[in-house]
Image: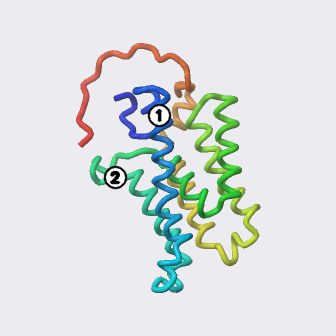
């Protein structure tokens, strides 16, 4: 239904705000939990050795890819913003906090989720480079992962960016014009 996207924004539009918030929280946890398991677990330190440094990055990358390209939905998933936010809240909390503040501010001012999401992704990249003093030395794998994740989020928002430019993107809380019935295709 709606945009046929499994993300929180579409769920909120189709099912209501409460369901959208629930999906956002679950998508955020989808990013937090695997990264936190590797980052904070002493269990893995015994056998992971040097891999322990990269394991949270790989776990986060897997969480984001699994959300954006889920096998069980024919590789058609969400945009990856909430899951990426969860990943980076663990990997680089200061930069993620700046990105989330950027997202909230732009959403409040302009009411475009897509604009807020793309700007937050760019803010994450800038904040990682500025806030993390080891961004280009000891934590370069995290910084490179931030760049890859930001590129993926922006690419996934390409249709939204086109609609923003053309002035046809939907704002949060705005009423949509009635659409003509369209033939629906199954997701799978």
Name the residue: 52% across, 57% down.
32
Tell me: residue 59, above or below residue 151.
below
Picture layout, residue 92 above or below residue 7? below
Residue located 50% across and 16% down the image = 175
* Residue under label 1: 20
The residue indicated by pointer 2 is 70
SS class, disc 2? loop
Q: Residue 144: image x %, image y %? A: 59, 67
Mark 2 vs mark 1, foreground winner is 1
C-alpha distance separating marks 2 and 1: 19 Å
Residue 148 location (% of width, % of height) = 54, 61
Question: In which quadrant will I find the C terminus?
Answer: top left
Mark before the other along the chain sequence, 2 or 1: 1
Give left or right: position of 188 versus 121.
left
Instruction: State the residue in front, 33 or 143.
Output: 33
Query: Is residue 31 or residue 79 the one in the foreground?
Result: 31
**Other-residue count near label 2 (Cα within 10 Å), few / some / many at <14 / 14–19 / ≥20:** some
List x then y, in percent, for residue 128: 69, 61
């Amino acid at each position: 239904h709606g945009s046929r996207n499994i993300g929180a924004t579409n769920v909120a539009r189709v099912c209501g705000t409460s369901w959208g918030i629930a999906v956002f929280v679950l998508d955020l946890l989808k990013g937090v939990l695997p990264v936190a398991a590797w980052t904070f677990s002493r269990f893995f330190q015994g056998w992971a050795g040097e891999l322990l440094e990269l394991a949270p990055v790989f776990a986060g990358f897997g969480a984001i890819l699994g959300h954006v390209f889920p096998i069980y939905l024919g590789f058609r998933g969400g945009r990856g913003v909430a899951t990426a936010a969860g990943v980076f809240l663990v990997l680089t909390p200061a930069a993620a906090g700046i990105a989330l503040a950027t997202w909230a501010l732009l959403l409040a001012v302009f009411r475009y989720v897509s604009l807020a999401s793309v700007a937050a992704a760019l803010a994450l990249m800038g904040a990682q480079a500025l806030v993390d003093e080891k961004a280009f030395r000891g934590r370069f794998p995290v910084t490179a992962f931030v760049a890859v994740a930001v590129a993926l989020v922006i690419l996934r928002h390409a249709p939204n960016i086109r609609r923003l430019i053309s002035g046809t993107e939907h704002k949060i809380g705005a009423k949509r014009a009635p659409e003509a019935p369209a033939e629906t295709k199954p997701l799978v």
